[in-house]
Image: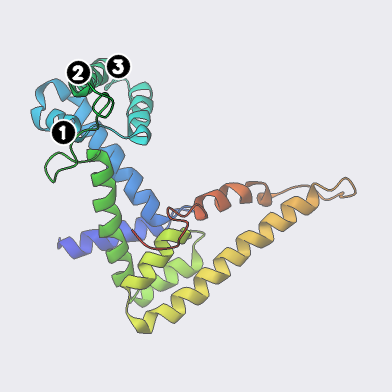
Amino acid sequence: MRVETVVESEVVELLARADICPVCSARSKAVDGWIYGAFYNLLHNEDARFRLKSGGLCREHSRRIVEMAREKSDIGSLPVSVVFKELLFGQLNLIGPGERKLFKRVSSSRNTGGCHLCEVSRESEKRYVIAIAKFFDSEKIRKLYEESYSILCIDHAREVAASMRAATVEWFVTLQKSKIESVIEMLERYIGKNDYRNTSPIGEERNAWLTASRIIGETRVTGRNE
């Protein structure tokens, strides 16, 4: 099977998931997959340990590692303890004399800079933004997105639109607006049904706030892309 066919099947699967941004979903799956693959046999995986130690861990991904260690018994706390010990030794070695050197950060050079899981996340995000933009040229994929409850979040909708052909942008912008308007209508219905005078039962609109939470939340207040 060609790589392009495999990627398209993954995009189809992502677009079929309800109420979740497909790029956010792919990004989370990539990070979780890397964590599982690394920590399942971490004591014999020197490359994974090196990558984790080189740039340290951000708060978000150290928290996710802990969550997965609790969720998956075949990971557990032992390999996480090993990595955290090594990271703390690294932090200990950065502490030096002088006001400016007391608590230094890990070097931000090309080879050792930044949380490796953030890099995994960024690479996955970039790959699927490009793939979705490309596959939206297909009538089959456009129809799938039109008929699904899947909706791209604000950041990824902007990036997908910037990566797609001009001929497809108008379709995408119109549909994205329609999907967001549908969520707003659901929110208004839920808010209205919480009025003490309301006698209608609350239905599917009870989860509209969760859908909204997965759409909003731009990473930059300026609105510029990463």
> Do the residues under discs 2 and 1 have CB atoms within 8 angstroms?
no
Marks 1 and 3, how far apart at CA: 21 Å
User: Which image quadrant is residue 93 in?
Assistant: top left
**Rendered position, 30 above or below 189:** above
Q: Which residue is mark 1?
A: 54
Q: Secondary structure at mark 1?
A: helix
Q: At 32% across and 62% down in the image, what residue appears?
A: 129
Amino acid type of the residue that numbered disc 1 sits on in the rendered structure: Ser
First in residue order: circle 2 vs circle 1: 1
Choose mark 2 or mark 3, whichever is in front.
2
First in residue order: circle 2 vs circle 3: 3
Q: Which residue is mark 2?
A: 89
Residue at the outermost right position = 197
For the N terminus, give its image quadrant. Answer: bottom left
Choose mark 1 or mark 3, whichever is in front.
1
Residue 152 seen in the current view = no
Q: Which residue is mark 3?
A: 77
What label does residue 178 carry, if any? none
Marks 2 and 3, how far apart at CA: 18 Å
